[in-house]
Amino acid sequence: MPVPDVLPGAEPIDLPGGPVGVLLSHGFTGTTQSMRPWAEHLAAAGLTVVAPRLPGHGTSIKDMNTTGFSDWYAAVERAFDDLRSRCETVFAMGLSMGGTLVLRLAEERADQVAGVVVVNASLATERKDAKLLPLLSKVVPAFPGIASDIKKPGVTELAYDKIPLKAAYSLQRAWPVVRRDLSRISCPVLVYRSAVDHVVEPVSGRELLKGCVHAEERVLPDSYHVATLDHDAPTIFEGSLAFVRAHAAAAAG
């Protein structure tokens, strides 16, 4: 079976640096393009940074519909293990579904993840049409997309313009599992949430803070969903770097 072509800008990121590593995970239907400025900011400060291209992303919607949460999580685990082989201490950070994935990583690898930073992590929905997803995913390949929810003018996210429904149903089935195990996370957690987000609803933020009681939430006042490419991106970049510096020594000790 031929390997699908990867869209320019969607390639994996690997920026070698010092003994502290950061895994970055992009979101559902998105690509590493939404992570690149964040990765470069952290790498410029001397960190080793990797951001895998999740399976089915950055190629085609048809390709993505052949993948699911277990495939995306496996890619995150591989990248994390690679970082651990190179670094003394490793943090995990993600946007949207990328946040869901790194939260799962911190649940499963509680003794290995030094800290977590999430931006608009997805954990639930209150949309009534979501109840139809199990049926629709069997008969309809895709719906109109959710990409480029960005307030800043002239900025576009490299992402699919449609939602692959089989893949979306896989994510929906994973949410209850991740929510159930949030109490297993023992590392520090920094939560960024956009005040206005047209993709991930406020219920996700509420569920995260309810399940992970030691998490610290910071609200982004001037960004929509893809906040890593929006007005508040510098706040995320600088805040996550300060978070790493504050907790790396404790994790290494």
Image: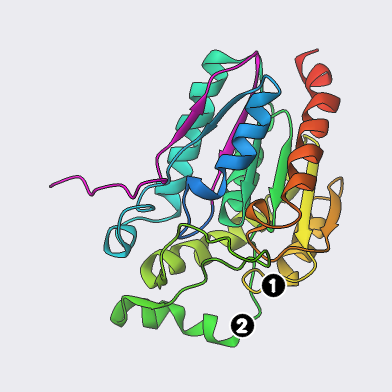
Residue 137, how many percent across, how many down? Answer: 36, 76
Task: Inspect the magenta stretch and tell me whether residue 86 lies in it.
Answer: no
Horizontally, residue 89 falls left or right of residue 134, namely right
Residue 127: which numbered mark, if any? 2
* Tag 2–tag 1 contact (CB < 8 Å): yes
Horizontally, residue 42 falls left or right of residue 135, namely right
The amino acid pointed to by label 2 is Arg
Location of residue 127 (image quadrant): bottom right
| Magenta-colored span | 1-26
Residue 240, how many percent across, how many down? Answer: 76, 38
Dot 2 or dot 1: first in sequence order is 2
Q: Write down the residue under mark 1.
A: 201
Give the secondary structure at mark 2.
loop
The residue nearer to you, when weighing 188 against 58, is 58
Q: How many residues crowd around disc 2 within 10 Å: few (fewer than 14), some, or many (20 or more)? A: few
The amino acid pointed to by label 1 is Glu
